[in-house]
Image: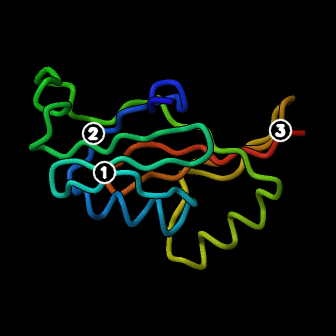
Amino acid sequence: MTASDQYATVRYLVDDVPAALDFYTTHLGFEVLTDRAPAFADVARGPLRLLLSGPASSGARATPEGSADPGRNRIHLVFEDLDAEISRLGEAGLSFVGDPVSGPGGRQILLRDPAGNLVELFQPV
């Protein structure tokens, strides 16, 4: 089985691959698949493979000028107890973008990775 059969893959452009690796593995439960820092690394959590492409990576070099800012798109991670995750990550020194928001499907809160990419933490109803 290849990685493309096993995972849904998302690429995030980051300015510091080691910092991104630390963020995703220490705080969000990702496992390192490949570490080619400082250019590139990839991590996985369940069926999600996240490509962390630094400035020297081919993925970053192929991105058009003017596309360097992180967007509003984000990965979506599901947790059983959002309040516990907010407490745990807050105690680790991470800060959130706004307050938790409730909707018909559940509750969510956003945080940013070291490069400014959004990560949504979600608890379903």
| Residue 48 placement (x, y as % from top left) | 54, 38
Q: Secondary structure at mark 2?
A: strand
Q: Cβ–Cβ below 8 Å for labels 1 and 3? A: no
Q: Residue at x 42, y 57 (%)?
A: 32
Q: Which residue is mark 3?
A: 106
Residue 13's tag is: 2
- The amino acid type, in three-letter code, at marker 3 is Gly
Residue farthest along the bottom direction in this orientation: 91
Q: Earlier in the sequence, mark 1 or mark 3?
A: 3
Instruction: Classify residue 109 as left or right of residue 19.
Output: right
Is 48 above or below relative to 18? above
Residue visible at 22% across and 47% down in the picture: 40
Q: Position of residue 19 (x, y in %)?
A: 30, 64
Q: Which mark is residue 115?
A: 1
Q: Amino acid at mark 1?
A: Ala
Q: CA distance from mark 2 to mark 1?
A: 8 Å
Q: Position of residue 96 (x, y in %)?
A: 55, 58
